[in-house]
Image (cartoon, rainbow, N blue to C red):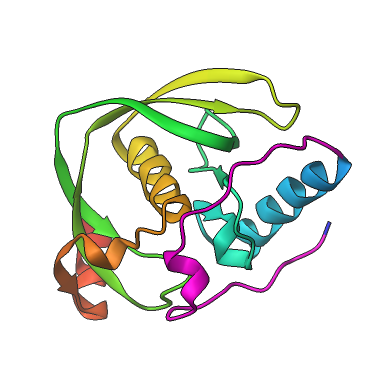
Amino acid sequence: MAIRKIVMHPDPILEEQCEPVKVFDKKLTKLLNDMYDTMIEFDGVGLAAPQIGLNIQVAVVDIDDETGTIEMINPVVVETAGEVTDVEGCLSFPGLYGEVSRPETVKIKAQDRTGKFYKLEAEGFLARAILHEIDHLNGILFTSKVSRYIEEHELEGMEEE
């Protein structure tokens, strides 16, 4: 396992449409393991391949609940419902937070590390994290969806609520 370097904005790879994964091998398994370790090391809840400099459709999400780690390869959003606005940040934008509206629920179809297709339904914070990472794979940054930026002192007040 290795901790990878996080790519920071304005690196152009963060705004590129990622290529689908076609080969499911030991290199992909190692990449997924490294991405998980990197996400944990930098205290994130999700990480997409472009955030470590790779232009491929791979992302991991782990919001530290009973769902465990979700590995998404070539994910596609099948359906969304509802809308909720909440605060988001991003490992590629350290110290930057903003209010972002996203669907309350999401259904996705993706592949696992062996190439097997699966479907997943998520709601709330997990849905938000999944959609944030899928946006990364499509070259969409959370900053393009921010309705209001949050100052650090405002963020501290929100955590106490």
Residue at the farthest right position:
26
Q: Main secondary structure of the magenta part?
A: loop
Q: x, y percentage for residue 118?
A: 56, 18
Q: Does residue 91 show up?
A: no
In the rendered image, the vertical position of residue 145 relative to residue 5, given as above or below: above
Using residue 21 as the reference point, say whether residue 91 is left or right of it.
Answer: left
Give yes or no for residue 5 being in the magenta stretch. yes
Using residue 63 as the reference point, say whether residue 116 is left or right of it.
Answer: right
Q: Nearer the viewer, residue 3 or 73?
A: 73
Q: Does residue 112 show up?
A: yes
Q: x, y percentage for residue 74?
A: 55, 36
The residue positioned 37% from the left and 78% from the top of the image is: 95
Range covered by the magenta-colored residues = 2-25
Where, by quadrant of the figure, is residue 20 drawn? top right
Q: x, y percentage for residue 75?
A: 50, 34
Where, by quadrant of the figure, is residue 41 drawn? bottom right
Where, quadrant-wise, is the N terminus in this rendering? bottom right
Q: x, y percentage for residue 48?
A: 54, 54
The residue positioned 48% from the left and 43% from the top of the image is: 63
